Image (cartoon, rainbow, N blue to C red):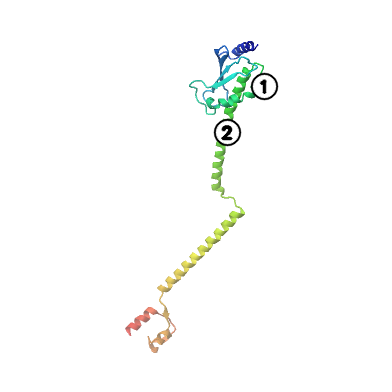
Amino acid sequence: MGREEQIEEREVLDSIFPDEITDISETEYRISITLDIPDDETEEQPVMLLTVRYPEAYPDEPPHLSLAAPPNAPSHPYLNIADDKEQLLKGLEATIEENLGMAMVFTLVSAVKEAAEQLAVERREAEAKEHEERLLAQEREENKKFHGTMVTRETFIKWREGFIKEMEEKRIAEEEERLAELKKARIKEAPRLTGKQLWERGLVGKDQLGDEEDDGVPLEEVQKLAIEN
């Protein structure tokens, strides 16, 4: 009974996949599955080779399955049959259990094709999302340059403390500069003595004071008078 069902299924598959199926033996064959990944931008869609071998009790027992890529097949950015075959075959286990006792190869071909296409789409979308998140992060960093840091109570207190400290340092610097200028001015400008101070010091006679008794006389001039006397 099992062998009859196997032969019948094989004939049906030959009509469905006339150019894709290749016999390996009476109980083993290989089906070439060309994927149709939506919005795929690669030059060629990926191809998988599903090898099916019937055990004696098939379809009451699961078929032996293996997946491979064709020799020298171009690589695809989101699907690698050598790396993904275990995941794809494991994904067929539930379908196999549901179809035990019935011809199931066409169902398995459809399921593994859909799973591989979905896997590639998910990876492409994940990459696009990651790229978008990087762009948004860069945009947020750029916007910080124009909008500055958001003001909170903590940032305001920190700014206020820094501002007060800066103003105090500026005031002290200006005061020190003012005192330094005053000190320079005192050194440059000779002190002036009144006529009375000159007479008290014996530098001039009273008759020399005249009407200028209250006018100040630079100390330098007094020193000259002292030398001349």
Q: Nearer the viewer, mark 2 or mark 1?
A: 1
The label number, if any, that marks residue 98 in the structure image: 1
**Residue 19 drawn above or below residue 149:** above
Q: Which quadrant is home to the N terminus? A: top right
Residue depicted at x 36% and y 81%: 223
- Ranked by sequence position, the earlier of labels 2 and 1 is 1
- The quadrant in which residue 48 appears is top right
Query: Which mark identifies residue 9?
Result: none
Residue at disc 1, secondary structure: helix
Residue designated by label 2: 126
Residue 111, image x and y in percent? 62, 22
Q: Does the image show residue 119? A: yes
Q: Is residue 104 left or right of residue 165?
A: right
In this rendered view, identify the residue nearer to me: 62 or 117: 62
Question: Which amino acid, mark 2?
Answer: Ala
Residue 17 percent location from the top left of the image: 58, 15
* Residue 31 falls in image quadrant: top right
Residue 159: % across, % down: 56, 56
Asked if residue 116 shows in the view, the reply is no
Q: Give the class, few, some or many, for how many residues have Cα within 10 Å of label 1's Cα (few <14, many ≥20).
A: few
**Element under label 2?**
helix
Identify which residue, 219 or 138, lies in the foreground: 138
Total numbered badges shown on the rendered structure: 2
Q: Residue at x 56, y 41 (%)?
A: 137
Judged from this view, the residue extending furthest toward the left is: 228
Does residue 49 appear left or right of residue 185 in this picture? right
